[in-house]
Structure formats: C-alpha cells, structure tokens
Image (tube, grey):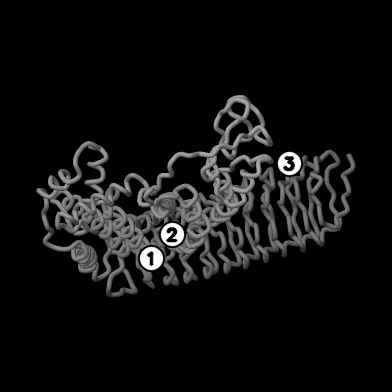
C-alpha cells in the first residue's frame, strides 16, 4: 500500500472515527471542555498514523479502519458505563412526605426540598441514595427513617459560578482589561511576539520540507494533507500564545496578587507587531513555496558520493516536464556507479538510459515509475535490490545482462504488463516475491547458479504455464507458485526434501506432479485447490502429509502413499480421493 493511498483511507476514516469514537469519548471524559479533549485525541491519532505511514508501514491504515468498530462498539460503551455515576436505588419509604417529594422531583443529596432525613436509631443524617445507615447499619426503609423540617435559610447561588475556577478567572481578567481601555484579543508583548515568530519559523521550515517532498516525487495528495495537518497544529498551538493565558497562569501561581496590578505589569511590556499574523503566514507560505519552485523549475538529477564514485540520489519533478532522462557515465570526473534508493520512484518519465558504469540498482529505485515501457540494464549491473522495479504498470520488457548475480525480494513485483523475462546464467540469488503478481509472464527458466527458490517468488503469475527447474535446486520455499492458475508443466528437482506449505495452492491447471524420491514431508495446503490434478506420485520416503495438502483436488480420484505416513485428517478434505498404500 502506498503512503498516499494510506493517507486517503485514513482521511476518510477520520470522519467516522471522529463521529463515532473521538467525540463521544471527549464528552465522556471531559464534560467541561470536550472540544479541547477531542482536538488532543484527534492530534494524537493523526501523529501516530503519520509516523507509521512514513517510518514504519502504511498498513496502519487497515488497523485504523478496524479501530473505528472496536472504538464504537466496545471502548465507547465501556467508557460510558464506567464514567456514569450509578446511585443505589432507594428502598421503599413509608413516609408519605418523602414519596410525595420524590414524585415532584425535588430530591437533593440528603434532603428533599427543605426536608432532612435522619436515622431514627442513631440520628445520623442520611442521603437519598443510602441503602443502610452509614453509622449503625440500619436499613433505609419504613419507620427507620425520620423526616425533619429544615428551617435553615435558603441561599441562592449565582449561576455564573457553575463553571471551572480557570474560566471564572479568565472572565474577571477580560473584564478588568476592558475596564482599563485595552482589547485583550489584540494585546501583545515582545515575548509573545518572539514565541509566535519562533512557532511560525518552525511552520515555515516544515512547509519547505513538505514542498521539497513534492518535488522529490511524493504525491500531491500526500503533501497537501500533510500541509493541512501542519497548519491546523500551528493554529492550535498559536492560540495558546495570548496575554489572557499568561495572566491566568500568573494569577494562579500568585493567588494573593491583585488582578489589576498583574495587568498593569504586563501593560508595561506592550509591543505592537509590524504585521498582523495572517500577513506573516502568507509571506512565509509564499517564500517556502516560491524558493523550491524556482530551484526545481526544470527537472534535475541529483548525485551524491557513493564508494569510489557517485550514485543518482534523486530525479526531481519540475514545473516543466521531461519524458526522457539520460544518465551520464561520469559526474565531477568520477564514475556514476549506482542508481540510489527511490531515485526514480513515482516519476512520470517514459524513458531512462543508463550508462555502462552502473553496478547496482538500489531498493525502490524505479518503484511506481508507471510510464516506463521498456528498459535495458547495462552489462555492468551485478545486483538489483528489493522492489527496485516494483509496481511499474507499463513495463513490458526488461533486458537483464549477463553478469547479474543478485535479484532481491519483490524486485519486479506487480509488473502486470511485463512479458517473458530471461534470467541470466550468472544469477546466483533470486529473492522472495521477485516476480509476484507478474500476470503476463508465461515461462520462466531458473539458471544453474540459483539453488534455492525463496517464498512467494512466482505467486499469482496468472499467465505462467511453464517453470523450468534444474536438478541442482535443493530447496523450494512455501507459496512459491500459489495462485498460478495456468501453470501446467512442473518437474520438481530430485534434491529437494520437502514440499512446503501452499507451494502449489490454487494451481487449478496443474494436472500431473511427480514428487521426487527423498521428499519426507508434504506441507499443509501444498496442493490445495488444484482442481485439475489427477495424477500424483508420492514416493515411499514421505512420512507426513499436512492439513489440507490435497484439499479440493476435484479430479484426484486415486493416490498411493506409504502405509506408515502420518496423514492429517483434513489432508484430503473435499476431494473424491481413494487412498491406497504401498506393500511393505
């Protein structure tokens, strides 16, 4: 999953996460200021998601999606139940006055209107939600409760003070500021201006980095969402830098200090700004966008030192477009010997010419370069690192040179238009998922130097019909041919000792397989869903057949296996197979 796609999913999920999880939790845990709590929770979630997207894995978006359901149906209900104050139900009270007042809804904690409840045995004041007398343990019911008229004067309470102490304090400060002829919303000091300018500078630097990421071929969606998020965080923090917050904190730390004196002290530090904050933001945005745009107006190839020469660090996009890139053999008098990690990732160029000095293609070097149709690697290349040419949706031909020794995991994964590929005879290592989901390749021949086929190397190559394996291969990992629905021609090498799990799962065209002598185990799901398989030779050396190994093999009517082999009870589930045994 790409970062931009992950962020798109996360942005969509944010609506549901906010409505069904974050807002309810904010109201549960912060009745005084749920908006602030919501913004904090939203910011924490956004920060965690971005950290995972950029530095760990964009797959966090999937977990975030399921987190909505977990939060809405488990966490929110549990939190609501936990936070709710549940009073003990009052037992039946025979006194008519209590019942009458209860009906009229005049109950308070330990009184009903101007009535006080007392325990008749010990005289202790009772609360309406008591079940027993807290002093003597007498049950709260019937004649055990004494009703007394409370003749204390009723004191009315100003509803203004039904808020937090800090809110009251802020209101007093605001009124006092107004009385002294100042507008607290526009009032500022040199220290406040300095803090705001520092914050704005940080925002400007982050915006500059974000613009550079765009020119370094990150998607406009990703960069746009990042900029919006950074701007919202900036606004949130900038709101804290105001004179009201400063005076409130000062007043709390110095409760004996007169408010008017505190205001007079801060008025002596008053300093107006030359430009309003909005104008400063516009200027910073113009500078941070304009400078990189001028620098990268035309596409560029950036080089950095690597070993004894240079490597291509990055090909940048520009305002102008360039469909063809020619990499020179030298830079600053030294050879260009590598294409660096992510050098052409996400680019829209159509053609790249590489010099005969290139030795290494680093990981993700051409990943998602979706417009390149064919590519010829120079004879000097000895290694192709992980995912170097993955997700190149237009690539239909690539020439791999003799001399190439190493193809790492996922090197050509999801190159759906790539047709036949000839692996060079010099190849020594072929990584897992190297040709995963290359759905247009019809035949592969493994060179003599490759003696181990790693997991998922040829999975879901839906056009693959023939795989040519040589006799010196000693190990074939699991899921290697999984989902190769047209594979019909496989001769397993004689030196392998195990058919790993899911090796041929859902190879629905495979009709015949001869398992070599020396194989001791057929793993779970090894031939699961091979619906055309009708002829299987199992050698006498097999001692174990795993779960669902031949499950849903609709055409496999008969099979002969060793009598002493341990066969899982589901090994032939949903298959019409009659099992016979070798004679000892």
Residue 369 x %, y %: 41, 66
Dot placed on the residue nearer the N-terminal end, 3 or 1: 1
What is the distance, in whole Å, between disc 2 and disc 1 at their CAs?
9 Å
Dot placed on the residue nearer the N-terminal end, 2 or 1: 2
Q: Is 427 left, or right, of 382 in this rendering?
A: right
User: From where the camera sits, is residue 151 visible?
Assistant: yes
Which secondary structure, mark 2?
helix
Q: Nearer the viewer, residue 308 or 114?
A: 114
Q: Quadrant of residue 462?
A: bottom right
**Which residue is tagged 1?**
219
Q: Quadrant of residue 584?
A: top right
**Which residue is tagged 2?**
3
Q: Which mark is residue 245?
A: none
What is the distance, in whole Å, between disc 3 and disc 1 at their CAs?
50 Å
Q: Nearer the viewer, mark 2 or mark 3?
A: 2
**Which residue is tagged 3?**
520
Residue 26 x %, y %: 46, 51
Tag 2 and tag 1, C-beta contact below 8 Å: yes
Which secondary structure, mark 1?
loop
User: From where the camera sits, is residue 426 visible?
Assistant: no
């Amino acid at each position: 999953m790409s970062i931009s796609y992950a962020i798109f999913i996360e942005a969509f999920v944010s609506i549901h996460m906010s409505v069904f999880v974050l807002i309810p939790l904010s109201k549960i845990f912060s009745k005084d200021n749920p908006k602030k709590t919501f913004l904090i929770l939203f910011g924490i979630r956004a920060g965690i998601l971005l950290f995972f997207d950029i530095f760990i894995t964009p797959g966090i978006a999937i977990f975030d999606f399921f987190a909505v359901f977990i939060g809405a149906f488990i966490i929110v209900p549990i939190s609501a139940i936990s936070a709710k104050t549940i009073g003990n139900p009052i037992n039946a009270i025979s006194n008519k006055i209590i019942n009458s007042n209860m009906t009229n809804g005049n109950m308070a904690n330990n009184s009903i209107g101007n009535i006080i409840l007392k325990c008749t045995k010990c005289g202790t004041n009772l609360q309406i939600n008591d079940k027993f007398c807290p002093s003597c343990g007498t049950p709260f019911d019937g004649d055990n409760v004494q009703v007394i008229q409370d003749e204390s004067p009723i004191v009315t309470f100003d509803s203004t003070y039904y808020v937090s102490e800090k809110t009251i304090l802020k209101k007093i400060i605001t009124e006092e500021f107004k009385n002294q002829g100042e507008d607290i919303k526009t009032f500022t000091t040199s220290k406040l201006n300095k803090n705001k300018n520092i914050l704005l500078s940080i925002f400007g630097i982050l915006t500059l980095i974000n613009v550079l990421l765009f020119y370094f071929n990150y998607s406009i969606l990703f960069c746009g969402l990042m900029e919006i998020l950074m701007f919202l965080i900036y606004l949130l923090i900038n709101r804290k830098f105001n004179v009201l917050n400063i005076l409130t904190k000062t007043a709390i730390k110095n409760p004996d200090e007169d408010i008017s004196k505190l205001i007079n002290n801060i008025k002596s530090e008053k300093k107006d700004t030359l430009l309003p904050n909005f104008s400063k933001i516009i200027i910073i945005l113009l500078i941070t966008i304009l400078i990189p745009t001028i620098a990268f107006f035309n596409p560029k190839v950036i080089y950095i030192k690597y070993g004894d020469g240079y490597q291509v660090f990055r090909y940048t996009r520009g305002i102008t477009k360039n469909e063809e890139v020619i990499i020179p053999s030298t830079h600053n008098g030294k050879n260009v010997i590598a294409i660096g990690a992510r050098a052409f990732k996400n680019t829209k160029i159509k053609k790249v010419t590489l010099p005969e000095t290139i030795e290494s293609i680093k990981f993700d070097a051409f990943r998602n370069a979706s417009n390149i149709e064919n590519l010829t690697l120079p004879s000097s290349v000895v290694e192709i690192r992980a995912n170097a040419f993955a997700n190149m949706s237009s690539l239909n031909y690539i020439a791999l040179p003799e001399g190439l020794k190493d193809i790492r995991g996922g090197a050509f994964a999801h190159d759906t238009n790539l047709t036949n590929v000839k692996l060079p005879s010099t190849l020594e290592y072929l990584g897992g998922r190297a040709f995963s989901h290359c759905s247009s390749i019809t035949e592969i021949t493994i060179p003599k130097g490759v003696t181990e086929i790693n997991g998922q190397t040829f999975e879901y190559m839906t056009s693959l019909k023939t795989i040519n394996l040589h006799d010196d291969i000693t190990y074939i990992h699991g899921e290697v041919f999984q989902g190769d629905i047209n594979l019909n021609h496989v001769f397993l090498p004689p030196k392998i000792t195990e058919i790993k799990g899911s090796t041929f799962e859902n190879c629905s065209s495979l009709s015949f397989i001869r398992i070599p002598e020396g194989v001791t185990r057929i793993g779970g799901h090894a031939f699961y869903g091979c619906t055309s398989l009708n002829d299987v030779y199992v050698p006498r050396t097999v001692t174990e057949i795993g779960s669902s190994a031949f499950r849903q093999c609709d055409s496999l009517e008969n099979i002969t296996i060793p009598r002493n082999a341990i066969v899982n009870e589901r090994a032939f589930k949903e298959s019409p197979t009659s099992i016979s045994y070798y004679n000892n």
